[in-house]
């Protein structure tokens, strides 16, 4: 037993000496030391950012009542936006008429909602509240069907959400603001409900 203990002790002492030597070397070369620390910090930060994004997008459930009950129609995430239809016929993009036919003639679905094709985080809409001196601001938005929020079983914090009556041609255009926008831009002002906002120059 004794030789093993001595060996362990020597190994630990060597490790401590190596650490001291490495620290002395780093102290003598401050430029290299700063570069190494910054490189490690950037690497750790980038890994943390990627993990946070992957965790939010891939691992967490969607913020809806029953995410396991949702089914996405179509095999591909992109099909024909700005480029025409793909030749293989593997679609994920449908016309409004096709969507309406699906809703009327596809049994087995509790509900079927539609959202804007070509949704792009890098092509936001411009919004400005009417009757104020506030400047327009960019906001990520998309057009959806009247039953969109009902399909996800979501409720409004204030005001109301869309319904089928909003899908009728000629009715006033309505919008739903995210809770985050309401809190951060308007300080949860209740008067925002029912007010007019100009979205891409249209009320």
Image (cartoon, rainbow, N blue to C red):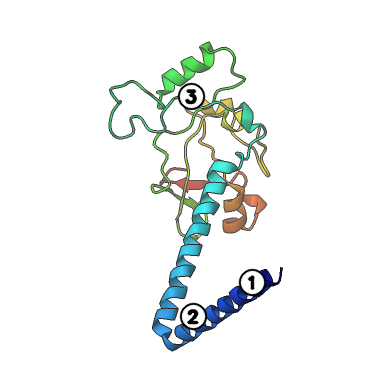
Which residue corresponds to mark 2? 22
* Towards the viewer: 142 or 82: 82
- Give the residue displayed 54% in from the left and 37% down from the top: 174
Q: Earlier in the sequence, mark 3 or mark 1?
A: 1
Nearer the observer, disc 2 or disc 1? 1
Q: Find residue 122 and report its horizontal and vertical position in percent.
A: 39, 49
* Towards the viewer: 169 or 38: 38
Q: Is residue 81 above or below residue 74?
A: below
The number of numbered discs placed on residues in the rendered structure image is 3
- Is disc 3 placed on a helix, strand or loop? loop
Q: CA distance from mark 3 to mark 1?
A: 63 Å
Q: Which mark is residue 17?
A: none
* Label 2 crowd bin: few (<14), some (14–19), many (20+), radius 10 Å: few
Nearer the observer, disc 3 or disc 1? 1
Asked if one can make out residue 141 in the rendered structure from this viewpoint, the answer is yes
Q: Is residue 1 above or below residue 157?
A: below
Q: Earlier in the sequence, mark 2 or mark 1?
A: 1
- Image quarter in which the N terminus is found: bottom right
Q: CA distance from mark 2 to mark 3?
A: 58 Å
Among the 4 quarters of the image, the one containing residue 81: top left
Q: CA distance from mark 2 to mark 1?
A: 21 Å
Which residue corresponds to mark 1? 8
- Give the residue displayed 59% in from the left and 52% down from the top: 180
Q: Find residue 97 and report its horizontal and vertical position in percent.
A: 42, 19
Q: Is residue 41 above or below residue 69?
A: below
**Left or right, 156 with reference to 138:** right
Which residue corresponds to mark 3? 73
């Amino acid at each position: 037993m004794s030789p093993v203990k001595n060996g362990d002790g020597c190994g630990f002492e060597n490790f401590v000496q190596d650490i001291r030597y490495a620290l002395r070397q780093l102290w003598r070369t401050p430029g290299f030391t700063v570069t190494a620390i910054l490189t490690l910090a950037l690497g750790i930060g980038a890994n943390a950012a990627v993990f946070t994004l992957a965790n939010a997008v891939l691992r967490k459930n969607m913020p809806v009542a029953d995410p396991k009950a949702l089914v996405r129609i179509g095999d591909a995430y992109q099909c024909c936006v700005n480029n025409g239809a793909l030749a293989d016929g593997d679609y994920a993009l449908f016309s409004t008429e096709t969507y309406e036919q699906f809703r009327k003639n596809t049994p087995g679905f509790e509900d079927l909602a539609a959202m804007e094709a070509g949704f792009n985080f890098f092509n936001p809409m411009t919004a400005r509240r009417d009757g104020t001196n506030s400047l327009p601001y960019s906001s990520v938005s998309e057009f959806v069907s009247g039953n969109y929020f009902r399909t996800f079983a979501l409720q409004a914090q204030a005001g109301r959400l869309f319904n089928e009556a909003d899908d009728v041609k000629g009715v006033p255009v309505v919008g739903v603001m995210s809770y985050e926008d309401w809190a951060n831009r308007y300080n949860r002002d209740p008067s925002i409900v029912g007010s007019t906002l100009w979205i891409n120059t249209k009320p």
